[in-house]
Amino acid sequence: MITLILIMIGGGLGACARAWITQQSKHYLKIDFPIATLFVNLLGCFLIGYTASIAHEHHWFSLFVVTGFLGGLTTFSTMSLELVQMLLEKNKVIKFVLYTVLQFIVGFLLCLFGYQL
């Protein structure tokens, strides 16, 4: 039960952080570019890599920050961590390439398809 509570609180805080960053960027940066999304995705990538590297012995911290907060902030960071882990493992190059293609190309095509429905 504590696991779900940690993830829920972290996820809620991450989603609120993303909403706040998006709102602030629209208010202060009047540009035609999704800078807030880019920022939270890149920040999430950095933070998930950093947190995953230091949170080996603290499962609760990983649940709260990685699964919860960063999952709420962005889901792109989780995919990036998975790609890094594939690259660091031996004999995972084909899996890395396949996963990259599926995530980016198929993900884009499904998004385009859904958008056009």
Image (spheres, rainbow, N blue to C red):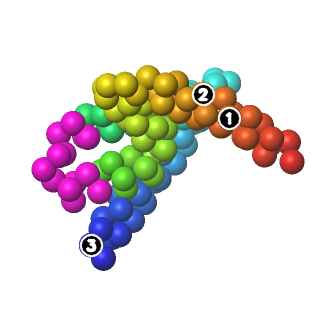
Q: Residue 44 at what x, y percent from top left?
A: 40, 37
Q: Main secondary structure of the magenta part?
A: helix
Q: Find residue 2 and name its label.
A: 3
Mark 2 to mark 3 CA distance (whole Å)? 36 Å
Mark 2 vs mark 3: in front = 2
Q: Residue 95 at what x, y percent from top left?
A: 48, 30
Mark 1 lies on residue: 106
| Amino acid residing under circle 2 | Val
- Earlier in the chain: of badge 1 and badge 3, it is 3
Relative to 35, is 4 on the left or the right?
left
**Is 61 a magenta residue?**
yes
Q: Residue furthest right?
A: 117
Q: Which residues are magenta?
A: 51-64
Q: Find residue 101 and name its label.
A: 2
Relative to 59, is 49 on the left or the right?
right
Relative to 116, is 50 on the left or the right?
left
- The reply to whether discs 2 and 1 touch (Cβ–Cβ < 8 Å) is yes
- Earlier in the chain: of badge 2 and badge 3, it is 3
Q: Quadrant of the N terminus?
A: bottom left
Q: Residue 116 at what x, y percent from top left?
A: 85, 42
Residue at x-position 41% and y-position 57%:
11
Residue at x-position 21% and y-position 36%:
53
Mark 1 vs mark 3: in front = 1
| Amino acid residing under circle 3 | Ile
| Amino acid residing under circle 1 | Val
